[in-house]
């Protein structure tokens, strides 16, 4: 959208919203939506992946306020109680408890009955392509989209094995291209940053101090994750069976059973950590190419270093971060002067030079995504 086409008042202007994957960082989507509503923008289309699919789906169902109230009350122990470790070789955790809560909010809502056009994106491991849910059960679409490979068990649908859409498309801009909206806003919560950036650095000083105090209080509370980690390690042991567990050290000396058991636990937990970290890095790189191919009118980027993907107890601060970044991005888009918070607010809006460079790098990328004919995308049957 050309900058000259903008008007001073956003009232009655429509927006197509793209909400990316990123685990707990996806709470920032809530803050972005709140700022859009506060300014009078009307969301007419949502395309979401993983946490973006969850937040977008709940919002479209009219239950975002209730969901926000719930997540802001979660502490360490609440999050642990929601994590249901499983012995399935398909993933270390189920999501039954979280999905049970979501089902109590959105019930048996169907996507085609929503007032907002919603697309949630999953990945079919069998056919190795994207699956777009634009009709059918909203709760099933969300569950498929959040199934991080190897971490959360997949959804089996006929011969499909559905996992997190972020595996192929962590920032699904394409479904919004045909939306009848005044502009497209994308929120990337797995963004690369020049250096590691903490959540506190991006918040205004008073809110940063509050979050720091909350974190110190949690640490002082002596929260112990040992038993939970042991359970996840046990699940990971099955998951990584067959990766090779030699019982000799680097110098060829045979290890004792105790040493072997301790090292096996460290190695298996390390492997699970590597799966999560690798997935995060891959999503960040993929998101850059999606933005290069289909630049949104407004792009908000949350550095992936602000928190871990599973720090779901930090909802309040992450929602606040999303709103502050949205204020800055929308003020720029509307041509307003905004003081911001010095150089702390990281809102990346691509310049012409950056976009040219990205397009040069991504010239080999197929561009048949809109129809799914060349990239292997398909729409999920209702």
Image (cartoon, rainbow, N blue to C red):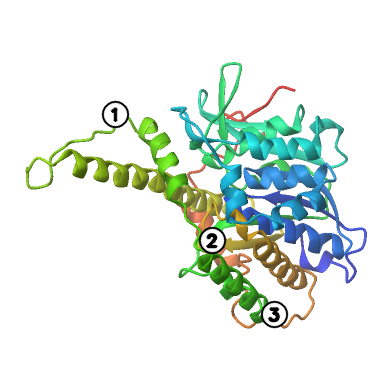
Which comes before the other along the chain, label 2 or label 1? 1
Looking at the image, residue 100 lies above or below residue 359: above
Tell me, yes or no, whether the two marked residues, 2 and 1, touch with CB atoms within 8 Å.
Answer: no
124 is higher (above) or lower (below) than 316:
above
Residue located at (62% from left, 43% from top) = 50
Name the residue rendered at 63%, 83% in the picture.
342
* Tag 2–tag 3 contact (CB < 8 Å): no
The residue that label 2 is drawn on is 307
Label 2 vs label 3: CA separation?
22 Å
Residue at 46% from the left image edge and 68% from the top image edge:
196
Residue 238: % across, % down: 38, 30
Q: Which residue is mark 3?
A: 340
Q: Quadrant of residue 113?
A: top right
Residue topped by disc 1? 242
> In the rendered view, does 224 fall on the left or right side of 55?
left
Q: Return the disc, 3 or 1, that comes first in the chain's sequence.
A: 1
Q: Quadrant of the N terminus?
A: bottom right
Marks 3,1: beta carbons within 8 A: no
Residue 228: percent from the left, percent from the top? 47, 45
In the rendered image, which quarter is residue 176 located in? top right
Q: Quadrant of residue 373?
A: top right
């Amino acid at each position: 959208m050309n900058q000259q086409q903008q008007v001073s008042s956003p009232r009655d202007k429509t927006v197509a919203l793209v909400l990316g994957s990123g685990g707990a960082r996806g709470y920032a989507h809530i803050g972005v939506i709140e700022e859009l509503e506060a300014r009078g923008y009307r969301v007419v289309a949502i395309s979401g992946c993983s946490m973006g699919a969850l937040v977008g789906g709940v919002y479209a169902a009219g239950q975002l306020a209730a969901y926000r109230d719930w997540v802001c009350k979660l502490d360490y122990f609440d999050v642990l109680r929601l994590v249901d470790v499983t012995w399935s070789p398909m993933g270390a955790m189920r999501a039954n408890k979280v999905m049970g809560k979501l089902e109590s909010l959105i019930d048996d809502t169907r996507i085609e009955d929503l007032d907002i056009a919603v697309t949630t994106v999953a990945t079919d491991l069998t056919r190795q392509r994207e699956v777009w849910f634009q009709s059918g059960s909203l709760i099933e679409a969300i569950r498929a989209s959040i199934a991080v490979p190897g971490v959360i068990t997949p959804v089996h649908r006929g011969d499909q094995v559905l996992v997190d859409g972020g595996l192929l498309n962590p920032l699904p801009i394409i479904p919004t291209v045909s939306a009848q909206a005044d502009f497209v806003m994308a929120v990337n919560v797995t963004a690369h940053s020049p250096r590691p950036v903490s959540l506190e650095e991006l918040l205004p000083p008073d809110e940063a101090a509050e979050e720091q105090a909350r974190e110190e209080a949690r640490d002082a509370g002596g929260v112990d994750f040992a038993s939970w980690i042991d359970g996840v390690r046990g699940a990971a042991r099955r998951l990584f069976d067959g990766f090779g567990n030699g019982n000799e050290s680097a110098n060829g000396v045979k290890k004792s059973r105790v040493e072997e058991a301790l090292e096996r636990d460290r190695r298996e937990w390390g492997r699970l950590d590597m799966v999560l970290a690798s997935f995060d890095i891959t999503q960040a790189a993929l998101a850059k190419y999606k933005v290069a191919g289909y630049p949104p009118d407004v792009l908000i980027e949350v550095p992936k270093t602000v928190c871990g993907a599973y720090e779901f107890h930090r909802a309040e601060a992450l929602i606040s971060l999303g709103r502050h970044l949205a204020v800055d991005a929308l003020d720029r888009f509307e041509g307003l002067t905004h003081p911001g918070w010095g150089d702390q607010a990281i809102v990346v809006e691509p310049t012409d030079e950056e976009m040219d460079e990205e397009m040069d790098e991504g010239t080999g990328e197929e561009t048949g995504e809109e129809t799914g004919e060349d990239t292997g995308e398909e729409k999920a049957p209702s």
